Amino acid sequence: GDSVTQMEGPVTLSEEAFLTINCTYTATGYPSLFWYVQYPGEGLQLLLKATKADDKGSNKGFEATYRKETTSFHLEKGSVQVSDSAVYFCALIKAAGNKLTFGGGTRVLVKP
Amino acid sequence: DTGVSQDPRHKITKRGQNVTFRCDPISEHNRLYWYRQTLGQGPEFLTYFQNEAQLEKSRLLSDRFSAERPKGSFSTLEIQRTEQGDSAMYLCASSSGTDHEKLFFGSGTQLSVL
């Protein structure tokens, strides 16, 4: 079946550091790929998405590129802030599908 | 607040009791989803409605679980004869027909079965 694997956390960084969270997936066909973020005490929010190979999703300084050849969708941010402390989830949905398949989440803690 | 709302936020119950959760989606969204999330894990799909029709159910949804969306607006998720393994965060999400891949999640109902 479909699956998403992402690096385990927690990831602890200093402010202004570079952040990478690895995500790889297994799925048939051409899924759409997503990053969701969960801030403390809040619901999951869509951070960015990419719907086909080589697409780059971006939002709030975060970027991720859909790499079909490596089945990856790594999340990056060049300079993190304390406010980026959250749990980040990589997810996929199959073409014409109705359900998101999530990875296990990566907790990120940014220290001032 | 026009987001997805869930009630209650927390529920503590004894094993064997029945519980019901409610979800109010964003008003113009015709798709509604239930997910379950256990500590340290990503959300797992339970079931999906388009309007009032329940179109997909996960094998995780045993016969003790039932979900309804009677008028295509709010939804309820009932768990009968709760077990300790049912303890989890139950998340509701909704999406529109025009961008069904963009899900809006509620803050969830945290269930603790003692």
Image (cartoon, helix red, strand yellow):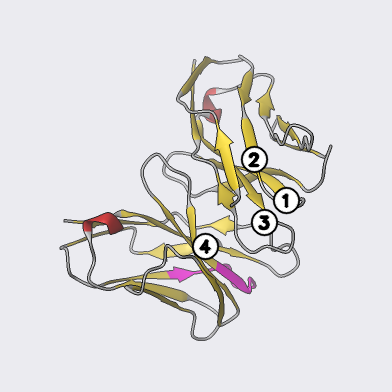
Check disc 1 and report the residue beneath it: A31
Same chain, labels 4 and 3: yes
Question: What separation in Å lies between label 4 and label 1 (alpha carbons)?
Answer: 26 Å
Which numbered tag is attached to residue A25? 2
Check disc 3 and report the residue beneath it: B102
Q: Which SS class for mark 3?
A: loop
- Discs 4/3, front: 3
Task: Classify A6 as above or below B46.
Answer: above
Determine whether label 4 and label 3 are within 8 Å by CB.
Answer: no
Q: Crowding at label 1, few (<14), some or many (≥20) Cα neighbours within 10 Å?
A: many
- Left/right of residue B84 with respect to residue A76 in the rendered view: left
Question: Residue A21: horizontal and vertical position, in percent?
Answer: 60, 27
Q: Which SS class for mark 1?
A: loop
Same chain, labels 4 and 2: no
Amino acid on which disc 2 is placed = Tyr
- Discs 4/2, front: 2
Question: Which badge, 4 or 3, is on the more N-terminal residue?
Answer: 4
Question: Which badge, 1 or 2, is on the more N-terminal residue?
Answer: 2
Amino acid on which disc 3 is placed = Lys
Question: What separation in Å lies between label 4 and label 2 (alpha carbons)?
Answer: 28 Å
Question: What separation in Å lies between label 1 and label 2 (alpha carbons)?
Answer: 10 Å
Check disc 4 and report the residue beneath it: B4
Question: What separation in Å lies between label 1 and label 3 (alpha carbons)?
Answer: 14 Å
